[in-house]
Image (tube, grey):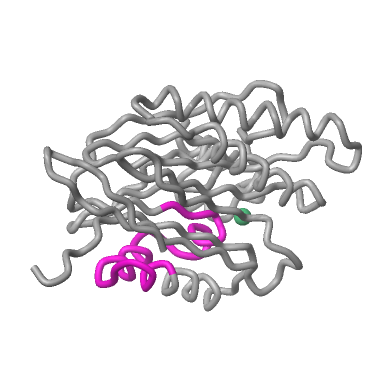
Amino acid sequence: MRTIAASGGGATIALMAVGRSHPGKVRPQNEDSYLIRPVPHGVLVAVADGIGGGPGGLDASTLALRTLDQALTAAITDVGRLADAVAQANRLVFQQGQKRKDLEGMGTTLTAGVVLGDRLFLAHVGDSRAYRVTPHGLEQLTDDHSMAAEMERFGTLSAKEVERHPQRHVLTRAIGPYNEVRIDVQDRAWGQGERLLLCSDGLSNVLADAQIWEIVEHLHGQAVVDRLIQAALEGGGVDNVTVVLVEVEPRVGS
Ligand code: MG
């Protein structure tokens, strides 16, 4: 758990970021990684889900997050800085995959957010997700870059058909397989009653948005993360599952 001072609307607030990753009940190793780090005036968080199942998955997710960690040391004043760091992560993972035969084609998803006092920057590639949680509900901020989700967006598949589609997990974009990658970015206003939830598909493939909401609605902090992971495990735990949450720390004694 990390507490980070941030300034929003002229006042100083304390942001709290918590995260946890679990290998699940089936996979031999955990290829998911997450990052929580204070940055000037806020917090940097990210989730990466290594792909391929081979040795490259864990290497890719670890290297991508290490690159973000090292690239973003100064104040992050615009979303372009975050996007540049994600592009750099892509180049480094790609180069690593070129260098070593056993890591060829290594890749990872990468969903990264910078929460400042009153702004949220997001950069996203793959099918890990960012959700905005308000007192009234849950909103998925990111598009899944998977075959099935792309088909749903183009209207060729219904949401119901997507759930059963054999290629629903095939990614259309990832960090690492190619020298260049298209990165979705967002620069949004951030309200102090809002929370940011990042997760790998080990959560979102098991729990529908309504089930995630039922858990986050009544809990705060580490309890949200632990309960979501527990629910994913109860749902079979077929994949690695990672959850990161950012929220304003409740004031003690006021
Ligand atoms: Mg996964």
Q: Is residue 191 above or below residue 227?
A: above
Query: Where does the C terminus fall, quadrant-wise?
Result: bottom left
Point out residue 150 in the picture as x, y percentages from the top left corner: 52, 35
* Residue 216 lies in the magenta stretch: yes
Point out residue 18 in the picture as x, y percentages from the top left corner: 41, 61
Query: Where does the N terminus fall, quadrant-wise?
Result: bottom left
Point out residue 101 in the picture as x, y percentages from the top left corner: 91, 37
Please name the residue shown 44% across and 72% down the image.
226
View quadrant of ligand 1: bottom right
Please name the residue shown 62% across and 62% down the image.
240
Q: State which quadrant residue 42 falls in.
A: top left
Of residue 229 and residue 145, the one placed in the foreground of this image is 229
Point out residue 224 in the picture as x, y percentages from the top left corner: 37, 69
Indicate left or right for 52 with 246 as reference: right
Indicate left or right for 13 with 106 as reference: left
Please name the residue shown 54% across and 53% down the image.
34
Q: State which quadrant residue 96 falls in.
A: top right
Give the farthest residue toward the bottom.
Answer: 234
Give the farthest residue toward the right.
Answer: 101
Q: Is residue 238 above or below residue 140?
A: below
Indicate left or right for 14 with 50 as reference: left
Of residue 159 and residue 104, the one placed in the foreground of this image is 104
Q: Is residue 78 above or below residue 120?
A: above
Q: How many marks?
A: 0
Q: Which residues are magenta?
A: 198-225
Please name the residue shown 35% across and 38% down the image.
40
Q: State which quadrant residue 86 falls in.
A: top right
* Residue 236 lies in the magenta stretch: no
Q: Is residue 111 above or below residue 249?
A: above
Indicate left or right for 112 with 9 as reference: right
